[in-house]
Image (cartoon, rainbow, N blue to C red):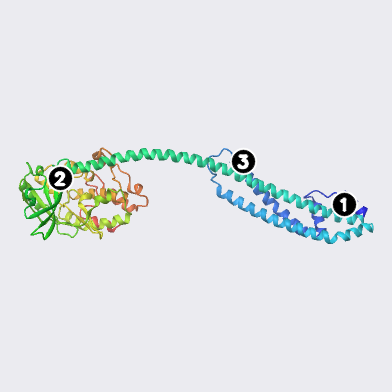
Amino acid sequence: MRAFWLALALAVPVRAGAPGDAALMEEFKLKEDYEAMEAMRPRIDALARELTALKESHAGKTEPDPGAPRRAAAREELTALLEELKDRRNKFKDRGVDQRLGQFMAMAMEFREGNNEKANRSFQGGIRHAQIIVEYKEYGHSVEMLLEDEQRAYQEVVARWKTLEEAKLRRRRTLQGAAAAAVLLPLLLLLWRRLKARRAALPAPETPAGDRLGRWSLTKSPKPWTYGTRWDGAGGGGGTVASVRLFDERLCAAPSSPAKLLQALRAAAPPKHSAVAAPLEAFPAGASIALVYPATAAKPLSLWLEEGRGVRPDKAVVFLRRLAPALDAAHRLGRAHGALDPDCVLVGADGTVTLEDFGVAVALAAAGAPAVGTPAYAAPELEAGPPGPPADLYSLGVLLYELVTGRHPFEGTNLPAMKREKRYKRLSQAAPGCPPALDALLDGLLEPDLGRRRPAPGGLEAALERL
């Protein structure tokens, strides 16, 4: 037995990877397992080199590598290979241990019988088997450490990137706050202009003596109207409910007059259409004219727009299609609303759309009264002349833009110049996802040149059908 332990102590195995290993493992019946592990090393080494290069490239970066998908794939493949290598190493270990235990007594007998060379070779195989297990364990551990180091370096890159992004976000929010203030001021100016257009030229509402206008008994408090004052009213013993409106007397003063305005109102009356509110009557009332409409529960579009909410483009198209037949019918007769704005577009609970005050602005211009309206929605040509059908189409374009985006297309202090120069943010930019055809339609409606404004009066419904 002394020879056995001496041989065990003096046995010197060949180094890993040498050609002798394969022959040794074949004799030890472990060649297949050994070669399977050896075959995996070139791919593992290649992936390890790739990750080493990535780890070194992370130094100083301030944003994640655009090659992140390739990095993730390399890490995933390398992790899977390490797991497979570990399994193969364990099988190599278990089989070798089993065989060494089975051959232990046989090798002892070889030493006793003097077959030292054969016994020593078996011992070398056993020792080399154990050494290969240790080497592959250390090899796998070194690659695992590389994975951890690369991941740590990458996380540092991500942390630096997040810090910079947070700083950018703070700066962006600061700039957005300033931009919001810059946008809010024009919006406030727009609201102020709208209120000024309605009220600045008009006196405080006063209820006529006796709380009556003609046959109409006036109820509730007076409210401002674009052209004067309005009340809820009842007539004929309270049977008919109406909206009674009284023009401001200054609109009936020279060169205008109540008689001229009454005649102009009758001439500018809209054609009969379900989407147009027709006056019940118009009559002289002292130094002014009273105009009476049927009462309605519908609400003006301005209440929706003042909330700053936009609607989907397809919903806006539905809205236009409900207005188009009425406008086309009037425009073919050469008649115009004249002052289309959100206050005179009424929207019912069931989605029906009705136009009020149709032709009133046209009548005032014909009677020689001063212009009253909402400049933000007025076509550029109204600076020089009376309203016509093309002006309605322009105002409709402004309404469409505001309906989709929740904002006015011309946000600034010099509205006339902005309109003439067509300075507005395209609908497709202000409302991403807007169909190009709707963008083109709006661009045609907001055309300042009358000769190029599209569609032509009377062609709105057909243009909408092409969307």
Q: Residues within 10 Å of mark 1 (few under 14, many from 20)?
A: some
Question: Distance from label 3 to label 1 (Cα)?
Answer: 46 Å
- Real-space Cα separation, disc 2 to disc 1, in angstroms: 117 Å
Query: Sequence-wise, which precedes: disc 3 or disc 2?
Result: 3
Q: Residue at 23% of width from left, 48% of height from top? A: 395
Can residue 421 be seen by looking at this rendering?
no
The amino acid sitting under disc 2 is Pro
- Type of amino acid at the residue the image marks with label 3: Glu
Callout 3 secondary element: helix
Q: Which mark is residue 221?
A: none
Nearer the observer: mark 3 or 1; the answer is 1
Earlier-in-chain disc, 2 versus 1: 1
Amino acid type of the residue tagged 1 in the rendering: Leu
> Badge 2 local density, few (<14 within 10 Å), some, or many (20+)?
some
Indicate which label's residue lies in the foreground, 2 or 1. Answer: 1
On-image quarter of the N terminus: bottom right
Residue, disc 1: 8
**Residue 85, picture quadrant:** bottom right
Give residue 108's position: percent from left, percent from top.
90, 58
| C-alpha distance separating marks 3 and 2 | 75 Å
Q: Which residue is mark 2?
A: 386
- For the C terminus, the image quarter is bottom left
> Which of these two is toward me, 270 or 146?
146
What secondary structure is marked by label 1?
helix
**Disc nearer the start of the sequence (3/1):** 1
Residue 83: x percent and y percent? 67, 55
Label 3: few (<14), some (14–19) or many (≥20) C-alpha neighbours in 10 Å? few
**3 and 2 marks in contact (CB < 8 Å):** no
Name above or below for residue 105 compared with residue 253: below
The kind of secondary structure element at disc 2 is: loop
Label at residue 56:
3
